[in-house]
Image: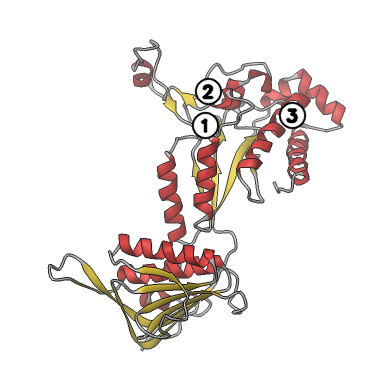
């Protein structure tokens, strides 16, 4: 007999042995005979449009792998109470924890219940994972799956952590929107719910900002590192070919919606005050005016170029963040804040004068002022740093 598996107990490894579900569920119990999922079975849902969307996503995944087509329908009194059906129930009063679910596989039906749509999504993913690894039967030719034998069990699960994130660095290397959609799909299949999207750095500025077009006209492109790249000339310009790309705002909105449909929030990262070389290459007045970069660099490493602390630069950053907030509806905006080499600040008479004006004792305190000021701006607009 299978046993109850619980993360907190010494037998937590049982969950992995019993069910091929990622991450291991909190509790799994064998219930006896399983369910024969056949092609043409009905996925009936209750709980409105969102429940229907989850049911549709499950059916699409199952059709793609292992290849069984299902019918998706809203709960109807004319449907039989038992039979070859899967039931997806969104029940806010069920008492199931937030983002949690209960999955029961019995001979007459498979029932998935959750108190919120996030939990229903997670349960649907777990059910798909079970189906994708369960024994199957084929048609006459043996090439078409017509039956999946799901094991009889009850799964009770809820996430241990509210923030389950993954970071994608699109600044150092541009990825296509199609790649990011696949990336989001795989996040959903692992029940991750936050994509930290690293969009700006020394090596590129990838996000279209309509008020400042040179951020992407200049900042999104660079000559790859190495002598070979320097010799690879574009016949049209006679200059080395550029590597890069950027995300237009319409593309970003589509990706944000795509993520939200899979229960994922995208947190954008706009680096400051350091990792600013691409922005300063596009708009040199944002830097210190000492050794302004003539182009976006390709080599790794921590560059010394920081934003200056003039009021005009803060106005620029606030303009940028307004467009960022318009694109990303989530609570958080990431501003980096790391690896700010302060040599240029120390050497700049104007920055030193600003420190005295602001009553700040050193460059570390100036960085604190910089980040706190941006934080207050975000808070005034209903967001959090």
* Numbered tag placed on residue 301 in the rendering: 1
Residue 209: image quadrant is top right
Q: Label 1 neighbourhood size at 10 Å, few (<14), some (14-19), many (20+)? A: few
Q: Quick one: 161 or 379, which is closer to the camera?
A: 379
Q: Name the outermost residue toward the top.
A: 238
Cα distance between the residues tagged 1 and 3: 28 Å
Q: Which residue is mark 3?
A: 315
Q: Which residue is mark 2?
A: 217
Cα distance between the residues tagged 2 and 3: 21 Å
* Contact (Cβ within 8 Å) of mark 2 with mark 3: no
* Contact (Cβ within 8 Å) of mark 1 with mark 3: no
Residue at the image position 60 percent from the left and 70 percent from the top: 98
Q: Quadrant of the N terminus?
A: bottom left
The relative height of residue 152 versus residue 72 in the rendered view (above or below) is below
Residue 336: image quadrant is top right
Residue 243: image quadrant is top left
Label 3's element?
A: helix
In the rendered structure, which disc, 2 or 1, sits on the residue that comes first in sequence? 2
Q: Nearer the viewer, mark 1 or mark 3?
A: 3
In the rendered structure, which disc, 1 or 3, sits on the residue that comes first in sequence? 1
Image side of residue 201 versus residue 80, left or right: right
């Amino acid at each position: 007999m299978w046993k109850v598996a619980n993360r907190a107990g010494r037998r937590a490894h049982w969950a992995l042995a019993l069910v091929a579900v990622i991450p291991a569920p909190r509790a799994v119990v064998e219930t006896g005979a399983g369910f024969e999922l056949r092609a043409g079975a009905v996925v009936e849902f209750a709980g409105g449009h969102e429940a229907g969307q989850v049911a549709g996503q499950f059916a699409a995944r199952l059709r793609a792998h292992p290849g069984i087509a299902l019918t998706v329908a809203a709960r109807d009194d004319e449907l039989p109470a038992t039979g070859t059906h899967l039931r997806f129930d969104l029940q806010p009063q069920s008492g199931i924890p937030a983002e949690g679910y209960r999955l029961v596989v019995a001979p007459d039906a498979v029932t998935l219940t959750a108190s919120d749509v996030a939990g229903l999504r997670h349960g649907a993913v777990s059910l798909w994972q079970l189906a994708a690894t369960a024994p199957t039967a084929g048609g006459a030719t043996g090439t078409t799956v017509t039956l999946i034998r799901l094991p009889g069990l009850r799964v009770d699960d809820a996430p241990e952590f509210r923030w389950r994130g993954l970071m994608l660095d699109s600044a150092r290397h541009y990825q296509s929107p199609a790649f990011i959609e696949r990336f989001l799909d795989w996040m959903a299949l692992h029940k991750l719910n936050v994509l930290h999207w690293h969009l700006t750095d020394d090596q590129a500025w990838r996000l279209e900002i309509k008020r400042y077009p040179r951020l992407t006209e200049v900042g999104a492109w660079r000559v790859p590192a190495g002598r070979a790249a320097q010799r690879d000339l574009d016949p049209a310009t006679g200059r080395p070919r550029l590597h890069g790309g950027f995300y237009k705002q319409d593309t970003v909105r589509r990706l944000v919606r795509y993520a939200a449909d899979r229960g994922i929030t995208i947190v954008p990262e706009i680096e400051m005050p350091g990792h600013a070389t691409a922005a300063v290459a596009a708009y040199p007045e944002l830097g210190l005016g000492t050794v302004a970069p003539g182009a976006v660099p390709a080599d790794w490493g921590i560059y010394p170029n920081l934003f200056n602390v003039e009021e005009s630069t803060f106005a620029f950053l606030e303009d940028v963040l307004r467009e960022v907030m318009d694109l990303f509806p989530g609570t958080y905006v990431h501003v980096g804040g790391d690896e700010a080499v302060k040599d240029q600040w120390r050497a700049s008479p104007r920055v030193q004068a600003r420190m005295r004006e602001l009553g700040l004792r050193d460059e570390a305190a100036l960085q604190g002022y910089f980040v706190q000021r941006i934080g207050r701006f975000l808070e005034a607009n209903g967001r959090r740093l």
